[in-house]
Image (cartoon, rainbow, N blue to C red):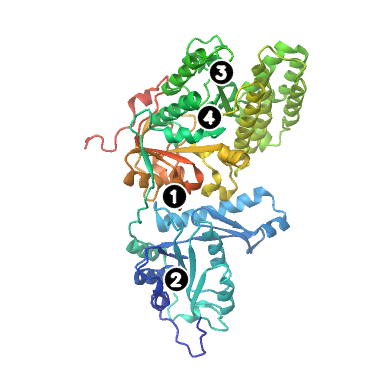
Amino acid sequence: MTRASPGTQRFRDRTHAGRLLADRLRDYAGRPDVVVLALPRGGVPVAAEIARALDAPLDVFLVRKLGVPGREEHALGAIATGGVRVLDTKLVESLKLPAEWLEAIDAKERRELERRERAYRGDRPPPDVAGRTVILVDDGLATGATMLAALHALRADEPAKVVVAVPVGDPDVCERLRVVADDVVCVLTPQPLMAVGLWYEDFSQTSDEEVRRLLDRARRPPVARALGTVRPLRGEASDYDDLVERATRARFVLIGEASHGTQEFYRERAEITKRLIAEAGFTAVAVEADWPDAYRVNRYVRAASVDSTAEGALADFTRFPTWMWRNVEVAEFVTLLREYNDALATTTPKVGFYGLDLYSLHRSMEAVIEYLDDVDPDAARRARERYACFDQFGRDPQVYAYEAGLAGAEPCEEEAVQQLVELQAMAGRTEPTEPDERFFAEQNARLVVDAERYYRAMFRGGVQSWNLRDRHMAETLGELVAHLERTGAPGKVVVWAHNSHLGDERATELAQAGQLNLGQLVRERYGDEALLVGFTTYEGTVTAASDWGGPAERKRVRRALPGSWEELFHEHGPGRFWLEPAELRGRRLERAIGVVYRPETERVSHYFLARLADQFDAVIHIDETHALEPLEPSSEWKVGELPETYPWGV
C-alpha cells in the first residue's frame, strides 16, 4: 500500500486511474478464473481499464443500503446484485423492528436496485462468480460502507477470492477491509483523505449511458462449463434405473415441474412414480392440490367411491386452474393407480392419492361437518355454530382475506382452532369403520385453521403467506406419513409440486427475503431420507393463463434467456437427459412458469437465480416440451397462440 505525500500528483480522470490500478493487478492478467466487477457508476470507467488490461470479463455489482427508519443514513443492512441481502442482525434485534417494516424497506430498495439492474444489464443475468477470483472495483474509498456491504453480499455467491481495488482510499478504511477481503489494493492512501474527488483533476459524474456503453464494449460470451455425467432419456425402460435405485433409500421423493402446464413433466413424473410404487415400496402420492378434492381421487383409486372413471373422480377440481389436475396425463395416471390397487392382495396396503394445499377453506369446513353428521350429530351442531363465523364474509375467501386482514373485521381464528381441538379429542372415542375417514376429517379441520391464517396474511404482502402455505404442506406431509404408519402402510411418499415448492429454497435468491419452501423443510427434518428432483425446459408450448382466473391457453414458451441453466443444458446436453447437479458450480437464472405465463415480461416474471447443485439432487431436462391437454380444452387452448412470424409463416 502506497501512502501519498503532500505533493502527490492527482489522477487525470477515472480512465487514467484505472490504468495505474491495472498495473498493480498485472499478476491476475490472462487468468480464465478472473472477473472484474465494478460498483456503479464511478467504479465502471476504472474497472473497464482493468478488465481490458487483464483480458478479463467486466460487469457491475450493485448495492443498496437498507436504512434505519427515520435515520436512513445508518445502515441496518444492504441488498445487492443477485437478490443477496445482508443484515446487521444485532442492530435489527436491538431496534425491535416489526418484520413488516423490514420487508417494506427491503421492497422499496429492491425496486430501485432492479431498476438499475435493468438499466445497466438489461436481460443479461448477473455474473457467475462461484469458485472464481473477483476483483471488486470502485473509484475511491471514503467511509468504505458501500464496499463493505458489497463484500459481504458477494461472499454469498462463493467466490474463491475477492480483491478490493481502488485508485484512492482512506488508509484506515483500506486496512479495515483487509479483514473481509482476501486482498486490498489502494494506489493512493492520503492522510487526510478529505474527499475522493479531490484526488482527480476530472471527477465529473459518470452517466448511465456511459456505464451501458462500457459494459457493451466489454461484453464477452460466458465460459461454458461441463455438465458432468448426463444420462440420456431414450424412452427405454432403463432410463431412470440409477434414479430409482437411489430413491429406494429415501422415504420422500419430491418430483417437481418447471411449469404447471407441460405434458412431458407430468408424463415423466408419472413414469418415475410408477416405478417407485412397484419397485421401491412407496404407498402414497401427495400433490400440490386441495385436500378434499384430492381425497375424492384417493377414494376412487382405493375402490371406495361411486365414481366409475378417473375423469369422474377428478370432477371436484373446479377451482382455477382446473387444467392442473383435470388433464389427460393425470387421468391416465389415476387410472393406472386404480388398476394397480385392484390387482393387489387384500392384505397388501393400497396406494393412496392425497392433497397438500390449503385453498379449500369452505370445502374443508363442509367436509368436517359431513363427517360429524355421521359419527356425532351434537358435535356436528357445534361445528356448524363455530364455522358460522365465516358466513358473514360469503363464499369467496378473498373477501375474508381483505376484511379480516386489512379492514379490521374480527377474525374467525379462535372458532377454527376450537373445532380442531375438539375433533382431535374425539380420537379413540368415535371411530368410523374406515380409519382413513377420521384422518380425512381431522386434516380438513387442521386445514381450516391454516387457511384462515393464510388468507388473513395475504394482504399484508411480503413472504408470510407463502411461508404459511409451504409450512402447511410440510406439516400435512408429516401427518400423512404418521397416519400411513399407524395403519400399517410404509411411510414412503412421492410428492408432486412445482419446482419452486420442491427445490431447496436456501439455494435461491428468494431465500434472501426470508422465503422458505416445502423442499427445504423436508430436507431440514428428514435429511438424506429426502430426494429432490427438478425439471427444466428450453422452449416449446405450455398450458397457462394470461391472467389469474383466465381461461387456459396454449402458449408458446420463449427460448431460455442467456446465462440460464436451461440455456446451458440446451447448448451442452443431448436434448433429453437427467443428471445429478452436484458438480454444477455457481448460480444461474432458472425459469419458473406457474399457472400464469407472461412472455412479454419473461425476465421479471419467470426467472430467479439459483445454485442448482444445492437446490436439487437430480434434474431432468427436456429441451422442447409441449402443452398439457386439459380434459375440457377451452376454445383459446384449441386455437393456440399464433406464431411470432404470423401472418407470413416464415
Query: In the picture provided, is 569 more to the left or to the right than 156?
Result: left
Q: Secondary structure at mark 2?
A: loop
Q: CA distance from mark 3 to mark 2?
A: 71 Å
Residue 583 tag number: 1
Q: Earlier in the sequence, mark 1 or mark 3?
A: 3
Q: Which residue, given by chain and number where applicable, does mark 4 sit on?
A: 494
Q: Are marks 1 and 3 in contact (CB under 8 Å)?
A: no
Q: Dot 1 surroundings within 10 Å: few (below 14), some, or many (20 or more)?
A: some
Q: Which residue, given by chain and number where applicable, does mark 2 sit on?
A: 205
Amino acid type shown at disc 1: Glu
Of circles 4 and 1, which is in front? 1
Along the line of sight, the residue nearer the viewer: 120 or 527: 527
Q: CA distance from mark 1 to mark 3?
A: 39 Å
Query: In the picture provided, is 276 more to the left or to the right than 105?
Result: left
Q: Position of residue 490 (x, y in %)?
A: 60, 25
Of circles 2 and 1, which is in front? 1
Of circles 3 and 2, which is in front? 3
Q: Which residue, given by chain and number where applicable, does mark 3 sit on?
A: 350
User: Which residue corresponds to the image point at 48% horizontal and 69% vertical from the top-left?
Assistant: 163
Amino acid type shown at disc 2: Gln
Q: CA distance from mark 4 to mark 3?
A: 14 Å
Q: Are marks 3 and 2 in contact (CB under 8 Å)?
A: no
Q: CA distance from mark 2 to mark 1?
A: 43 Å
